[in-house]
Amino acid sequence: MCTELITDMGKIIKRDRYLQKLIACRHNHMIKIVTGIRRCGKSFLLFEIFTGWLKEQGVDTEHIIHIDLEDRRNKELRDPDKLLEYIDSKLLDDSMHYVMIDEIQNVPEFEDVLNSYLKVKNADIYVTGSNAKFLSKDVITTFRGRGFEIKMFPLSFSEFYSVYDGSRQAAFYDYMVYGGMPQIVFEFSKETKAEYLKSLFTETYIRDIKERYQIKQDEVLGDLLNILSSSIGNLTNPTKLANTFESVEKIKVNRSTLTSYLEYICESFLMEKAVRYDVKGKRYMDTPCKYYYTDLGLRNARLNFRQIEPTHLMENLIYNELRIRGLNVDVGVVPVRKRNDSGTLVQTQYEIDFVCNQGSLRYYIQSAYHMLDDDKVKQEKTSLRNVDDSFKKIVIVSDEISVMRDDDGITTISLFDFLLAENPFEL
């Protein structure tokens, strides 16, 4: 089985989670759309891993069509009509042809091209894209209900560790600082890793956002990214950010401008937004919310590796791992009414770091870097103890401990168990 990627350095990276999704959706008469941040491995997934698997199943090379739209040699195929003509010319017979197109957003009206193959029985279409505005948010309408999205992330810690040459603790430190972009795994010096990430952030991600959305206020975008990078895990909203700009940066920025810039950052897969959910009231609260980086190394690179706070990075890491595992993640709010010292009933809101949903399953997750004394244990568990339902409640700590359960049904597990276990929710 081609579930392993052998690199030039003899290392092996498994991306089985995404390969299995591709295998499961073959021949489903839908357009398979692999989305995710640039340089996270989308094209390699299609052109090497999935292609290798197809060949092992007996599919010959002539029935596997690769089109790399980032390659200037294929510039003419960025014209939608020429792309359509080229694909048609490669459909040699009635056998199934696997058409794989990298960075499809480089083609104007690409949706018309792809929709043209929805009823072609001998064409199975796979595309990659790095722009969620066209490939994720509007996938249902754009592809008339015939698009199937596979969201790809940078390497998980387990993928990263599987090829790391060193101890688990050393791997964890490198992952927390430099993240999981595939190229980073095989860079030896810290200086090279840092320079690669800083260049990637500036020359690829920021340039993409500015060019795609015709942004004129470069300094505002840069300052906004700095503010978000410094405050991961903190609740914020455009109004609060506008106040920060005025008080700290000494400039006035329109709230609607910040709202748009936040959308652009998320639509480019650089960050994700987690909204608040009232657990008892069973309703969403639009503002404030939290923003998490898709890759920790990019966040650290933005701040020139100056603010490596383990508590905030651990929270971001847990969020990313939950998303990689396919869960929808919100920030939980638990309102509790209790009497104060004067006997008056007052309402207090406790926060649960993550409320995670996957189909009919739900998990409440609390990130606690250390719980060294009873007061800290009480603080971290209070919100979970005030949830009335019977869904599983988990506290994740950085310490290497055995799995523990208390009388309230709350499970405490180590971060390594959470990151490396096949199903940490059943520990």
Image (tube, grey):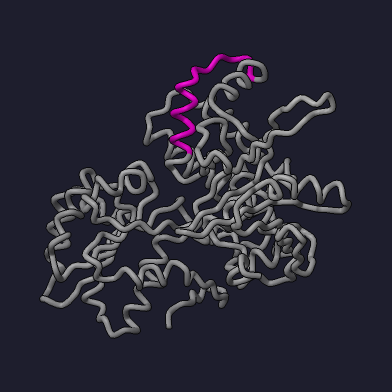
50 up-or-down from 86: above or below: below
Asked where in the image residue 58 lies, by quadrant, the reply is bottom left
Q: Which residues are magenta?
A: 249-265
Could you tell me residue 309's position as x and y percent?
Answer: 74, 45
**Image quadrant occupied by the N terminus:** bottom left
Looking at this view, name the residue that lies furthest to the right.
373
Query: Residue at (43%, 79%) from the top-left corner?
Result: 2
Query: Residue at (58%, 72%) from the top-left corner?
Result: 422
**Image quadrant occupied by the C terminus:** bottom right
Could you tell me residue 275's position as x and y percent?
Answer: 53, 39
Q: Nearer the viewer, residue 100 or 277?
A: 277
Residue 246 visible, this angle = yes
Could you tell me residue 45's position as x and y percent?
Answer: 41, 66
Residue 101 located left or right of residue 288 = left
Q: How many marks?
A: 0
Query: Residue at (81%, 51%) from the top-left corner?
Result: 377
Q: Nearer the viewer, residue 18 or 91?
A: 18
Query: Residue at (49%, 42%) from the top-left corner?
Result: 203
Q: Is residue 409 magenta?
A: no
181 up-or-down from 5: above or below: above
Residue 196 visible, this angle = no
323 up-or-down from 283: above or below: below
Q: Nearer the viewer, residue 374 or 287?
A: 374
Asked where in the image residue 170 lies, by quadrant, the reply is bottom right
Could you tell me residue 165's position as x and y percent?
Answer: 68, 72
